[in-house]
Image (spheres, rainbow, N blue to C red):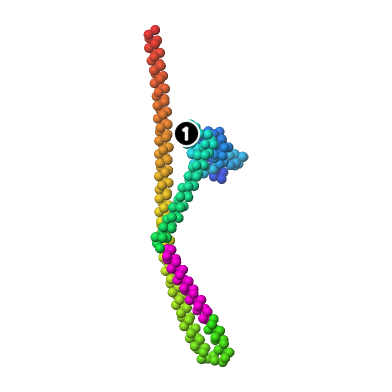
Amino acid sequence: MQNELGGEDVSGGYSIGEVAKKFEVHHARLRDWCNHGLIDSYRGARNARFIHESEFKKIEQIKQFMERDPKPTLDEVREELFKETLLVQKKASDRQDEMSTALSNALQKEGLYEMFEMFAHKFSEMEYKVAKMDEMQQKLDSMSKYLESMDQKSEIEAKLEKALEEENQIRLRVEAKLEQVQNEQNQKLQEQIDSMNRSIENIDQQSEREAKLEAELEKERQIRLRTEDKLDQVYTEQSQNQKKEKGFWQRLFSSSSD
């Protein structure tokens, strides 16, 4: 399998030579960065060293640090990378806090806390009524057995069956009401969850737009830096050419005077 740089793909990694060519960095310098722990690398086939593509962004950062004047030491570069890592972690933590706050605000805004409390209260009431009915059913069963033993089954059994039927009807109505309440609350809860998901999706979209904007700004900055470097080079070449021409004419006029 070939990677995008044209070399052998080893667990998503690229050889030192490939990476050095891609980022226009000398092999020895890139290897030195690896040896000092600035870049993570690993050994592949034939003990060759490979760098995973996840380290590419770090290489770009190191190049930018090394272009500073005065040139920083490797320890100073390592410290800068550590600061960048802490900054990224802080941004991720801030975003998580932002999402948690948004979720909490959505719950408060939509009244979900009150809805949950009301649902729990009603559910407790329903459970209490069902438990009381079960207790009454047990008492009725015990009484039925007792009356059977007293040979008064026929008349009292009819009353017990009637009472039991009435209790069963009440139970069915209570269970139907409980199911209705549960369905209504589930529907409201689903609507609130959908609303929160849309809010979270809006936050993700905003974060994505901000990330794209940062990438565009970084790209423009790199273009500006390259342009400034090119202008400095052109200016230097012009200055050198002017000095050469000036020296030529001075020697020419000096020869004519002699």
Give the number of callouts: 1
Residue 249, by quadrant, is: top left
Highlighted range, magenta: 112-137
Quadrant of the snapshot with the N terminus: top right
Q: Could you tell me which residue is drawn at 39 percent across and 17 percent down?
A: 246
Residue 120, given in percent of the width and then of the height, sits at: 46, 68
Query: Is 46 a magenta residue?
Result: no
What secondary structure characterizes most of the magenta part? helix
Residue 183 position (above or below residue 83)? below
Residue 256 position (above or below residue 81)? above
Residue 86 position (above or below residue 74)? below
Residue 102, given in percent of the width and then of the height, sits at: 42, 55
- Residue 204 visible in the snapshot: yes
Amino acid tagged 1: Arg
Quadrant of the snapshot with the C terminus: top left
Nearest the viewer among 160 and 118 is 118
- Residue 4 visible in the snapshot: no
Q: Which residue is mark 1?
A: 68
Q: Could you tell me which residue is drawn at 58 percent across and 37 percent down?
A: 35
Q: Could you tell me which residue is drawn at 40 percent across and 35 percent down?
A: 224
Q: Badge 1: few (under 14), some or many (20 or more) residues near its Cα, within 10 Å?
A: few
Secondary structure under badge 1? Answer: loop
Residue 221, given in percent of the width and then of the height, sits at: 41, 38
Q: Residue placed farthest to the top in the image? A: 258
Q: Is residue 47 left or right of residue 162?
A: right
Residue 30, given in percent of the width and then of the height, sits at: 54, 36
Q: Could you tell me which residue is drawn at 50 percent across and 78 percent down?
A: 132
Query: Is 115 a magenta residue?
Result: yes
